[in-house]
Image (tube, helix red, strand yellow):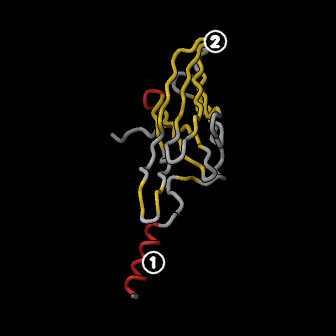
């Protein structure tokens, strides 16, 4: 009987809820704008929620790329929507799903996956955009200069 109780305790520890490693602390500072090689300026907005404008890139020719969060349904990954405009004309738009753990079944029900840091490469590989999830459920957008490859 003690063996069954011990096995049950181990099962509870292994299958029990724990905070996701993908979630970043809420008190991280907002990132500063970054200038691309062509003079474009990228800015990210802190704690991006559903339907919020999360980041922009302003191009020297007057084009503007806006990135919005479309949110996430229960147990689903976050979806971002990119819209590039010139004045009132939309040049293009598309949506991108963020990286996400798989939904798993346990002895105690279903465990939803978590957002994983998703990185996009911009400016011909010179700039990275990393999107993480804060513990409050909002998204953190961070533009950074890419580390050049070692020769």
Residue drawn at the location 55% of the way across and 20% of the way down: 84
First in sequence, mark 2 or 1: give its number: 1
Number of labels in the image equals 2
Judge the density around disc 2: few (<14), some (14-19), many (≥20) Cα neighbours within 10 Å: few
**In the depicted structure, whether residue 23 falls above or below residue 66:** below
Nearer to us in this view, 15 or 27? 15
| Image mark for residue 88 | 2
- Residue 27, image x, y percentages: 66, 53
- Residue 46, image x, y percentages: 66, 41
Q: Secondary structure at mark 1?
A: helix
Q: Nearer the viewer, mark 2 or mark 1?
A: 1
Residue drawn at the location 42% of the way across and 65% of the way down: 107
Residue drawn at the location 65% of the way across and 34% of the way down: 52
Judge the density around disc 1: few (<14), some (14-19), many (≥20) Cα neighbours within 10 Å: few
Question: Residue extending furthest bottom?
Answer: 2
Nearer to us in this view, 10 or 60? 10
What whole-number distance in Å separates the C-alpha atoms at marks 2 and 1? 61 Å
- Residue 43, image x, y percentages: 62, 32
**In the depicted structure, whether residue 85 falls above or below residue 139:** above
User: Is there a contact, CB below 8 Å, between mark 2 and mark 1?
Assistant: no
Q: Secondary structure at mark 2?
A: loop
Q: Quadrant of the N terminus?
A: bottom left
Question: Residue extending furthest left?
Answer: 151
Residue drawn at the location 42% of the way across and 72% of the way down: 11
Can you identify the residue that label 1 sits on?
9
- Residue 28, image x, y percentages: 64, 50
Nearer to us in this view, 25 or 39? 25
Q: Quadrant of the C terminus?
A: top left
| Image mark for residue 104 | none
């Amino acid at each position: 009987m003690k063996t069954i109780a011990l096995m049950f305790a181990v099962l509870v520890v292994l299958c029990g809820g724990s905070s996701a490693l993908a979630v970043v602390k809420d008190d991280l500072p907002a990132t500063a704008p970054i200038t691309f090689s062509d003079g474009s300026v990228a800015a990210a907005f802190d704690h991006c929620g559903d339907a919020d404008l999360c980041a922009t890139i302003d191009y020297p020719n007057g084009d503007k790329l806006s990135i919005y969060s479309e949110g996430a349904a229960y147990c689903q990954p976050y979806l971002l929507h990119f819209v590039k405009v010139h004045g009132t004309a939309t040049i293009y738009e598309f949506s991108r799903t963020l990286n996400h753990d798989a939904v798993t079944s346990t002895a105690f029900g279903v465990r939803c996956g978590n957002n994983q840091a998703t990185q996009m490469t911009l400016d011909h590989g010179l700039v990275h955009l990393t999107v993480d999830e804060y513990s409050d459920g909002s998204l953190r957008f961070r533009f950074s200069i890419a580390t050049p490859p070692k020769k």
